[in-house]
Image (cartoon, rainbow, N blue to C red):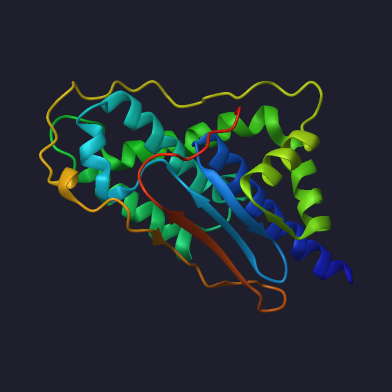
């Protein structure tokens, strides 16, 4: 392995490590992470854009915090490495912002939500850089992690002894007052899985780098201790 390939492996591994760590913070179940020759993260969030109105009408403050963390998990690699938001990451962020903009009543704007998510990543990064570096190196060595339990074991093993407990880092913008959701989301079939695939290409060897998000049902996503 030459130095250029090693650097590219580390870049992809860091990208996926950030998706995986911030995904845990968002309450996602991490089902698979791969970093070479194909980079990708397969995870399941506790919310999806199509049922956002349904849940927001019942708990605006909680859902606002959840969506901020979900956006942070998608924006994390871009914020941490100053990469351009593109491909599947960009499509997912846009989809969540559009779903947020469609919510009824008074609320912060989708742009403000985006800013809050980016800010929360910056605050979270500061005490966790050593942890991220160790997880990145572990992914370079292992290349693939299967299953949520395996990912939890890896990140716990890599956690520095003095690492702080999870910092929520979500700015405290007030959510809109409790209101009735004007949506027929409750009548939707909620057992249909949805997925995303990104065919982004590696700068080194043409290896596609992708983020996949798989959703099956509305509840049951495992939340790690972050």
Q: Is residue 52 above or below residue 209?
A: above
Residue at 26% across, 27% down: 60
Residue at 53% across, 60% down: 211
Quarter of the image where the C terminus is located: top right
Q: Is residue 125 left or right of residue 170?
A: right
Q: Position of residue 223 (x, y in %)?
A: 53, 33
Q: Is residue 88 above or below residue 30?
A: below
Q: Quadrant of residue 24?
A: top right
Q: Is residue 214 left or right of residue 101?
A: right
- Count of all numbered marks drawn on residues in the image: 0
Q: Is residue 65 left or right of residue 183?
A: right
Q: Position of residue 214 (x, y in %)?
A: 46, 56
Q: Position of residue 138 (x, y in %)?
A: 80, 49
Q: Quadrant of residue 144?
A: bottom right
Looking at the picture, tell me which residue is in the foreground, 4 or 66. Answer: 66
Residue at 45% across, 27% down: 170
Looking at the picture, tell me which residue is in the foreground, 46 or 172. Answer: 46
Residue at 35% across, 44% down: 218
Q: Is residue 16 left or right of residue 55?
A: right
Looking at the picture, tell me which residue is in the foreground, 113 or 31. Answer: 31
Q: Position of residue 43 (x, y in %)?
A: 52, 51
Quarter of the image where the N terminus is located: bottom right
């Amino acid at each position: 392995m030459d130095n250029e390939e090693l650097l590219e492996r580390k870049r992809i591994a860091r990208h996926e490590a950030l998706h995986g760590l911030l995904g845990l913070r968002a309450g996602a179940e991490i089902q698979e992470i791969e970093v070479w020759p194909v980079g990708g993260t397969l995870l399941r969030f506790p919310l999806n854009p199509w049922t956002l109105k349904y849940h927001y009408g019942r708990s605006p403050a909680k859902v606002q915090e959840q969506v901020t963390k979900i956006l942070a998990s998608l924006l994390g690699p871009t914020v941490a490495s100053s990469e351009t938001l593109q491909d599947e990451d960009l499509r997912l962020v846009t989809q969540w912002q559009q779903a947020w903009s469609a919510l009824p009543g008074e609320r912060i704007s989708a742009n403000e939500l985006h800013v809050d998510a980016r800010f929360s990543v910056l605050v979270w990064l500061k005490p966790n850089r050593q942890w991220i570096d160790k997880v990145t190196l572990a992914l370079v060595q292992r290349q693939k992690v299967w299953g949520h339990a395996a990912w939890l074991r890896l990140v716990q093993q890599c956690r520095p002894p003095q690492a702080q407990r999870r910092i929520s880092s979500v700015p405290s913008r007030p959510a809109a007052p409790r209101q009735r959701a004007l949506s027929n989301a409750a009548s939707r079939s909620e057992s249909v899985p949805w997925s995303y695939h990104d065919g982004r290409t590696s700068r080194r060897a043409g290896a596609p780098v992708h983020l996949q998000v798989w959703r099956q049902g509305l509840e049951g996503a495992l939340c790690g201790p972050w």
